[in-house]
Image (cartoon, rainbow, N blue to C red):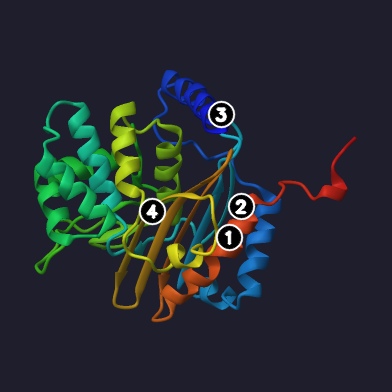
Amino acid sequence: MRRCLQGILLLLCCSASMASGQTVCDLDQGEDTLLQQRLETLVEQHGLASATRRGALALTLLVLTDPDHPRLAQINGHTMLYAASLPKIAILLGAAVAIDEGRLTPDAALRKDIDDMIRHSCNACSNRVLERVGRDQLLELLQSPRYALYDPEGSGGLWVGKDYAKGPAYRRDPLAGLSHGATTFQVARFYCGLHLGTLVSPAQSEMMLDAMSRPAIAHKFVKGLADLEGLETYRKSGTWRSFHADSMLVRSGDRAYVMVALADDPEGGAWLERLAQPLHELALSPPVPQGRRGN
């Protein structure tokens, strides 16, 4: 019953967003002062404030329990960092859009490649899906007004400018020169749209959610939340040398949130594992201290 009510609320929110032409969440008014203070305190308590100050750690926490009033907190959220395999979520979106537009046939081989690309982070699978979506078409989609998941005149965002294989990039991002880049803010926007069902059609939204469920690589955020029960998680991570990335949509009953982290440090994977449960607790904490609630 609770999941049914949640679905109705999301459908109403989705309808309103689509009617206004908005495809990916507008978070301009989402910054939450109290959540921001708590996030900064959490980072300090876990000994990672210096990492954020030197730009080695970026974090975004987005609480979506009330879809009409998202609550956003972030540190270095608009900083482009190398994100390894995390930007495969952009390829996933490109495939879903191409299927919706009739440019791509959702055959069994494609679906298996999509599942393995996300769940197992298979590089060869990613390259096959990217080939079918189109490299230039994907970059156009990410920069389009409809999605605006990469802003070339702002702080960038999600970028895939190289196959997941040896060889040169075919197009590096124009701001940071990265082949596979992201900002935690734009990744959080992606997950917000995924949660609300505004990215693509209902059928392809379901396909994307299914591919991102049941992650097969149990490290970072997944390992950090392993002891908790009753969570629905949708996730994509990335690792290359000292670069560690993770991103996750978490649904817990009628509550939901997104957490995204990018790190550039040999210990980055351990940082993300250590932060997962405190971020979870922060996301589910009351938005206003109990003692300050009005009558």
The answer to whether the residues at label 1 and label 2 have Cβ atoms under 8 Å apart is yes
The answer to whether the residues at label 3 and label 4 have Cβ atoms under 8 Å apart is no
Residue 188, how many percent across, how many down? 45, 48
Query: What residue occupies the far right of the structure in this picture?
Result: 295
Residue highlighted by disc 2: 283
Cα distance between the residues tagged 1 and 2: 6 Å
Instruction: Identify the image quadrant of the C terminus.
Output: top right
Q: In this view, does 23 lie above or below 133?
A: above
The reply, left or right, for residue 295 in relation to residue 199 is right
Q: Is residue 55 visible in the rendered structure shown here?
A: no
Look at label 4 and name its amino acid.
Arg
Cα distance between the residues tagged 2 and 4: 17 Å
Please tell me which residue is depicted at 66% across the width and 74% down the height of the picture.
45
Instruction: Identify the image quadrant of the N terminus.
Output: top right
> Which dot, 3 or 4, sits closer to the camera?
3
The answer to whether the residues at label 1 and label 3 have Cβ atoms under 8 Å apart is no
Sequence-first tag of 2 and 3? 3
Residue highlighted by disc 3: 1
The answer to whether the residues at label 4 and label 1 have Cβ atoms under 8 Å apart is no
Q: In this view, does 138 lie above or below 240?
A: above
Q: How crowded is mark 4: few (under 14 residues within 10 Å), some or many (20 or more)?
A: many
Check disc 2 and report its element: helix, strand or loop. helix
Residue highlighted by disc 4: 235
